[in-house]
Amino acid sequence: MELKKALTVFAILGLLLLLNMLVVTNPGMANRVLPQTETSAVNVDAVDEEVPLARYALDKTLEGISKFISFTGFRNATRGNLIMILVGLFFIYLAIRYNYEPLLLVPIGSGIIIGNIPFFQDGGINLQLGIYQEGSVLNYLYYGVLKGIYPPLIFLGIGAMTDFSSLISNPRLMLLGAAAQLGIFLTFLGALYLGFNMPEAGSIGIIGGADGPTAIFLSSKLANGSMVHGYETKNLIGPIAIAAYSYMALVPVIQPPIMRLLTTKKERLIRMKPPRSVSKLEKIMFPIVGLILTTFISPGALPLLGMLFFGNILKESGVTKRLADTARNSLIDIVTILLGLTVGASTQADVFLTGESMMIFILGAISFMVATAGGVLFAKVMNIFLKGNNRINPLVGAAGVSAVPDSARVVQHEGLKYDPSNHLLMHAMAPNVSGVIGSAVAAGIMMSFLL
């Protein structure tokens, strides 16, 4: 059956080739079918008698085939393209096989493959295919990344999904979210040491917050390939975004060893006092007060925190259920698709496979580990001043990074390993959501210093 289909295809191709030869070897038909410039070449009076028209037709056919081959990906593929396609396949594999952030890694992995399909590129030809070719569909969609449009919309959806009850009931846990931002500022110094200029270093440091939208937003302002605060910056949006989302997906792999290393078995068994019940009024007032307070402290974070708390107001007000449902379902799904796909597609091999990208991944890993350690160690410091059931299980401090809700789930899983009845999820959500706020505030502070 398959052989029959193949023979049919070859027969059709042969017929088309025969028709092509008949057209160009028939002067009357050639004058009607071919453009004037071509018919002049096959005019009987103009063609050398020693060059048969059939030979001319064959030459033109071979020339067409040669041009077709020159435009294929097989002809234009580079080693870098193949490496990046394998990276994209690996991301998709992690998402499907291990369920690591599939809503992020599947679009990003697919985008990496799309962005590294090789095509013919010439200085005088714009095929409008690649994300960096002006006028292409991907180029238009990428505008939302370059101008920082997608991250605030993601924050709107996050706000509409987030329940701040655990943070409201135990506000001191907010300190753990603040402590986890230590990784951001230490990585900023490390990036400066490695030769990145100040705006680039600020964008790299924010990876430590394990917050992809915040990392994209800040890098779109500080490391977008333009002049920033007197510094000529490189376009680092792609490497920074891929690093941030990679470490978000690898939270279940990276955090547990650090948590075990920095805590004792006795500390892991600490039972925390159940969170108190939070009133409806408190839930409504928190995003309003939080919006005013945080944006007065860090106005640069307004696009992110304004949308985050606005989304939460939609959720908690109780009178805008349709808007809240749209924000946390349809809207955030659409923006996640566009953001993941375009960020992935921006990692073309010639742009992404550089020494700077490798250093960003290393610094990002260090930043994320320092942030995790900062939250755990600060919980231990707080326990020095707390007694009885007011003490904090240090595992909860690891949730201070803003990978919501994955870090909180890791804390829950680790706690259950040592005491199957010790549920830490609700406690861990407090530093987890405060980490989201903290990383956005840190981004705003970076912008105020560096823009």
Image (tube, rainbow, N blue to C red):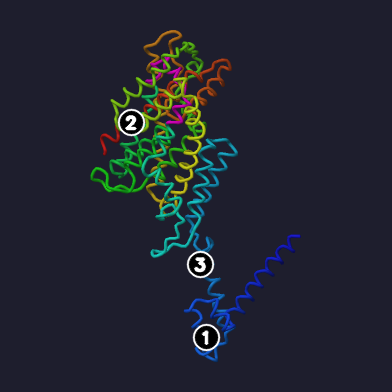
Question: Is residue 395 among what the camera can see?
Answer: no
The CA span between labels 1 and 3 is 29 Å
Query: Bounds of the magenta span?
Result: 156-175
Residue 227's place in the image compared with 373, above or below, is below
Label number found at residue 43: 1
Q: Residue 290 at x, y = what percent?
A: 35, 22
* Rendered position, 68 above or below 341: below
Q: Nearer the viewer, mark 1 or mark 3?
A: 1
**Could you tell which of marks 1 and 3 lies nearer the N-terminus?**
1
Look at discs 1 and 2 and give the one toward the viewer: 1
Give yes or no for residue 169 being in the magenta stretch. yes
Quadrant where the image shows the C terminus = top left
Q: Is residue 444 magenta?
A: no
Determine whether the residue tagged by mark 2 lies in a helix, strand or loop: helix
Label 2: few (<14), some (14–19) or many (≥20) C-alpha neighbours in 10 Å: some
Mark 3 or 2: in front is 2
The residue to which callout 2 is attached is 302
- Residue in front for this viewpoint, 121 or 388: 121
Lower sequence index among marks 1 and 2: 1
Which secondary structure class fits the magenta region best? helix
Q: Amino acid at mark 3?
A: Ser
